[in-house]
Amino acid sequence: MYPVSKAIFIGVLFLCTSLGFSQDIQFMRSYYADDFRDWIFFDSEDHEIGSLRARFQLKQDYSQWDFRVGELSGFILQRWNGKANEWEIRSGNTFITVTATWPGQFDSWRISTKDKVYYLIRDRDPQDFTWHLTLDQKNICRIYNLYFRDPRDWEIEKFIETMDPALEMTALFLVSFYSVKE
């Protein structure tokens, strides 16, 4: 009987520690109440796990961003100076391009990875900020503001088990940037 209880204890301990060290983003919050150049990412236990920051803090230049979540880091750049409808995201060996579905309209985005095309679309409800990330017309995640019409706090609800962290970062950047930009 003793070896069985020891095995159960070790199994429960392993399960708790593996869940506790997850780098899964649950929500994000702007660092300052009146400035959207710094964002902080939190896990489901409200632990800070990463950040998203505009590269040029002293200028009003939002064309380059840096991010970090756990071991993942990378940057987000406007592809062309002054054209806010095309972006590229680089993290390790991952390269993602982002274009507005329709030029000058920032509520629908085409996100292209090496082999897949995703769409990030904002709901048409003017009373709320809710975005949906889809692949082949299947909803992968929903990102919504926690407080009514307040773009400072966002929660991400995932409908798949694992999500590419660079893709998740891309969606969170677009949601935070273009929900505030209006």
Image: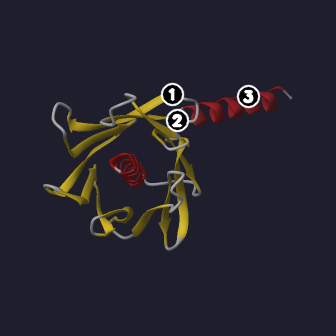
The amino acid beneath tag 1 is His
Residue at image position (49%, 73%) is 136
Mark 3 or mark 2: which is in front?
A: 2
The amino acid beneath tag 2 is Asp
Whole-angstrom CA distance, mark 1 to mark 2, is: 6 Å
Position of the N terminus by quadrant = top right
Is residue 165 placed above or below 37 in the rendered structure?
A: below
Residue 23, visible in the rendered structure: no
Instruction: Identify residue for label 3.
Output: 9
Q: Count of labels shown?
A: 3
**Residue 160 place in picture, x, y as percent:** 57, 57
Q: Are marks 1 and 2 in contact (CB under 8 Å)?
A: yes
**Residue 109 place in picture, x, y as percent:** 37, 64
Whole-angstrom CA distance, mark 1 to mark 3, is: 26 Å
> Residue 72's quadrant in the figure?
top left
**Residue 150 place in picture, x, y as percent:** 48, 40
The reply, left or right, for residue 172 in relation to residue 59 is right
Circle 1 sits in a helix, a strand or a loop, which is it? loop
Is residue 175 placed above or below 115 in the rendered structure?
A: above
The reply, left or right, for residue 13 in relation to residue 120 is right
**Residue 75 place in picture, x, y as percent:** 25, 46
Front one among 82 and 162: 82
Q: Are marks 1 and 3 in contact (CB under 8 Å)?
A: no
Instruction: Identify residue for label 2.
Output: 43
Which label belongs to residue 47? Answer: 1
Whole-angstrom CA distance, mark 3 to mark 2, is: 26 Å
Circle 2 sits in a helix, a strand or a loop, which is it? loop
